[in-house]
Every structure is written in C-alpha cells, then in structure tokens.
C-alpha cells in the first residue's frame, strides 16, 4: 500500500510500538480511505474487511512522500537464495531512505535492477526518488517499467502508479516557461501574506491552497517554538512553479536553488506537493525568524545551519547522516574545509559542490551549538547579534569561543567521535 503517512501519525505509530507490548504483525493495520487519508490502528474492527497487515519493519519504511510497501519478509525455505538476497537489499534500501540516506538507497536499488531488471519494487521506489529530485523523465520510465512487470501483483501500487503518471504530466508542464510571464494570486491568511504563481494554481492539485496554508501554520508553530519567537507582522510567502522560479530568480545565484528569503519567503512547489514542500517552508521560515531576531542574515553559516536543522527535524531526521559526517571528515583531512569566517557574509560565489559542503558545515556547526547551549543561551546569542555585536563578540559572550575556536572544537569532535569513518 503506497500513500503518504503524515509524520505525526508515523510518530504516534512508533510510540505505540515502543510503549506497548510488541503486537503480532497481524495486529497492526494500515489502510487508506476513499478520501486518500492514511490510517494506522491495532483495532481490527476499525479496519476495512480485509486490511493488509503491516509489520513494525514496514512502519519504519514509510516515507514522507509515500514510500511504503508490503512487508519484505523472506518466504519460508528461501533463506540464502536469490530472493532472500534481493529482499534483504530492498529492506536495507528502505532503512537508508528512512534515515535520509537517499544516495545510498538509490545505489542499492540500482544494484537490485542490475541483478533483476524486472524487479517491480526497485522500479517503484526509484520512480518516487527520481520524482522527488525533479528527474521526471527517469521517474516516468521507472513507473512504466513497474506497471509493465508488476502484472496483477501490487494492486494498490498499480492504482497509485497510474495516478502518479498523470501527475508527472502536470509537473512537466510547470517546467515550460510561460509566454504570459509571472502572475501572482493572493491567498488570505492571518499570519502570512501568501502569493501563488497562477500557473502553479491552475496546474496544481485541488487541495494545493489548503495544503500550503496548513504547512505554513505548522512551520509557524514548530519553528517559532524552537527559536522562541514569531514575527510581529505577517510574513510574505511566494510560491512558484519551477519554470516561473527560474525565470524570476536565475540571476541571483551561482548554484541551483529551490528557495530563498529576502524579506519574503520564495519557494518552488510541485503541482502535487507533499513533504518536500513542508520541509522547504520550514527551512525558509527559519530564515524569516532569524532576521526578525537579528535584523539581518549574518553570520550566514548560523542562519543556514539553523534552517537546515529545522528542515531535517521536520522530517524526523538526525542533524547529519553517517555519509555526511564521513564527507566532512574527508574535507578536514584533505584540507578542503571551507572556513566559517568565509561563510559568514554569504554563500555566494560557490559552485554546486562547494555549496553542498558549505551547507553541511553550517548544519554541523549549528548542531554543535544546539548540543552545547540551552534554549535561553541560543536566544541570547541571536539577541546579541540583533543588538549589533559582531559574530565573535556574541559567540564569546555566550559560548566562550570565537568563530575560529568554535570551528576547531567542531572539527575535533568530528575526528574524535567518528574515527572509523
């Protein structure tokens, strides 16, 4: 069964699994009603007549934009056979997806297809991964391959796959530049001044507007609670289709972006958005709150690092994945680390590879500060910056280290804590 399970529902399901005696797999049921809402229950009387039982492993494999599947259990008597190895590879890929290790998951799924070119599950998950990355042609190819080889198996997946093919056409149309230019439509909201690209509104799903406003409400509540404040005035938000965004803002950056904040939040939205838009709004709303507290965007590494943390925690992810920590360690050892002082004014002038490293360093530095400061200290740090203190003055007053000292402590922790990476 493949439908998006909202993060709060997944968290509740996980809490039930951890706090109650472990139920048999057949005692947990996941199903989707006629309105597309996903339900999790251990009460068989609430489930449809023949619900599909879902194991704890399957609950862990649910992904923000619809990754889920039948329990990947090895058939009796198949241990050590090709089918067993394939299922173990698929389980490992889903575990990587749940931890945010999308690149490693993609490699594992591609390896499954090299061994078994007609393996439907691998085509299925790769189609969703590529769709989230904006690789619409590849997503379509994997979806069509899935539909060709799945036969009568995975009936709920087939239905969802056919629906996804139709949605991909909507997404492709948003990649086509409009000769009419950008036209924005205003949406009503008490805490946000929202403007929606009319091409996106016309091409998008019927619930696009409602979903966007719900995501913004969640961002205001959760990020505001994390940083300890919310803006006094309504925050401006502009949502674009991809082509409209590129036309309007390609001159601003030397690397590819999907959102930024310049006094208003500007973000790209899919025609049929899901968790990816929610996390992007969390990210950019953090920038809005940072500017509200400090009056500016510097130090840029702290601004971006806090935004990255908000984005990742909104998905239930750790601050950094194992592969990202390994990459940072390699940069330290190779002498390729970009100093935080270089990143304090902005990330401008960086190519794609350098920008990726800059964001990882910023995330690691912000995570270090969160681990070593309590909420009042973090609020004081931002307040001092807003009162005109330099980066080093604010850091010394709150942390006892200047920028260089914080960087040294962070690098030392990366090397000492992960010596085997």
Image (tube, rainbow, N blue to C red):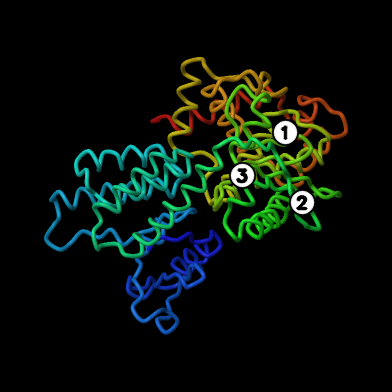
Horizontal arrangement in the rendering, residue 226 relative to residue 110 (left or right)? right
Residue at x 70%, y 29% (from the top left corner): 300
Q: Which mark is residue 280?
A: 3
Residue 380 visible in the shown view = yes
Distance between mark 2 and mark 3 Cα atoms:
20 Å
Residue 57 visible in the shown view = no
Query: Secondary structure under badge 2?
Result: strand
Q: Which mark is residue 186?
A: 2
How crowded is the residue under tag 3: few (<14 C-alpha within 10 Å), some, or many (20+)? many
Sooner in the amino-acid sequence: mark 3 or mark 1: 3
User: Residue 213's x, y, as percent?
Assistant: 69, 57
Query: Secondary structure under badge 3?
Result: helix
Horizontal arrangement in the rendering, residue 290 relative to residue 416 (left or right)? right
Residue at x 56%, y 49% (from the top left corner): 271
Identify the residue position indicated by label 1 in the image: 399
Q: Residue at the right extreme?
A: 387
Distance between mark 3 and mark 1 Cα atoms:
29 Å
Sooner in the amino-acid sequence: mark 1 or mark 2: 2
Q: Is residue 43 above or below residue 274?
A: below
Residue nearest the observer in this picture, 4 or 131: 131
User: Residue 120's x, y, as percent?
Assistant: 27, 51
How crowded is the residue under tag 2: few (<14 C-alpha within 10 Å), some, or many (20+)? few
Horizontal arrangement in the rendering, residue 200 relative to residue 109 (left or right)? right
């Amino acid at each position: 069964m493949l439908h998006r399970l909202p993060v709060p529902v997944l968290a509740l399901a996980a809490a039930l699994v951890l706090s109650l005696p472990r139920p048999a797999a057949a005692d947990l049921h996941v199903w989707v009603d006629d309105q597309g809402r996903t339900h999790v229950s251990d009460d068989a009387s609430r489930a449809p007549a023949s619900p599909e039982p879902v194991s704890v492993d399957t609950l862990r494999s649910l992904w923000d934009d619809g990754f889920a599947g039948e329990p990947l259990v090895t058939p009796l008597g198949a241990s050590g056979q090709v089918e067993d190895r394939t299922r173990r590879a698929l389980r490992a890929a889903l575990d990587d997806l749940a931890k945010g290790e999308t690149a490693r998951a993609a490699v594992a799924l591609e390896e499954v297809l090299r061994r078994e070119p007609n393996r439907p599950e691998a085509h299925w998950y790769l189609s969703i991964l590529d769709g989230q990355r904006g690789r619409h042609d590849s997503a379509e190819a994997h979806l069509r391959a899935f539909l060709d080889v799945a036969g009568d198996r995975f009936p709920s997946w087939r239905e969802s796959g056919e629906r996804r093919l139709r949605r991909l056409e909507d997404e492709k149309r948003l990649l086509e530049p409009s000769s009419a230019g950008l036209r924005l439509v205003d949406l009503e909201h008490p805490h946000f001044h929202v403007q929606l690209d009319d091409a996106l509104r016309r091409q998008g799903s019927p619930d696009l507007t409602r979903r966007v406003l719900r995501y913004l409400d969640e961002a205001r509540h959760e990020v505001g609670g994390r940083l300890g404040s919310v803006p006094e005035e309504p925050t401006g938000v502009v949502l674009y289709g991809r082509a409209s965004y590129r036309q309007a803002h390609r001159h601003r950056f030397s690397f590819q972006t999907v959102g930024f904040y310049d006094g208003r939040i500007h973000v790209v939205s899919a025609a049929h958005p899901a968790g990816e838009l929610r996390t992007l709004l969390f990210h950019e709303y953090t920038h809005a709150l940072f500017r509200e507290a400090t009056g500016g965007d510097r130090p840029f590494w702290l601004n971006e690092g806090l935004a990255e943390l908000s984005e990742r925690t909104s998905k239930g992810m750790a601050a950094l994945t194992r592969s990202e920590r390994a990459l940072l360690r390699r940069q330290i050892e190779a002498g390729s680390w970009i100093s935080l002082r270089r990143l304090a004014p902005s990330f401008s002038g960086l190519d794609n590879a350098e920008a990726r490293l800059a964001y990882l360093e910023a995330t690691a530095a912000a995570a270090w500060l969160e681990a070593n400061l309590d909420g009042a200290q973090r609020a004081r740090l931002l307040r001092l910056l807003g009162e005109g203190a330099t980066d080093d003055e604010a850091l010394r007053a709150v942390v006892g280290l200047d920028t260089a000292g914080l960087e040294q402590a962070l690098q030392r922790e990366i090397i000492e804590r992960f010596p085997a990476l």
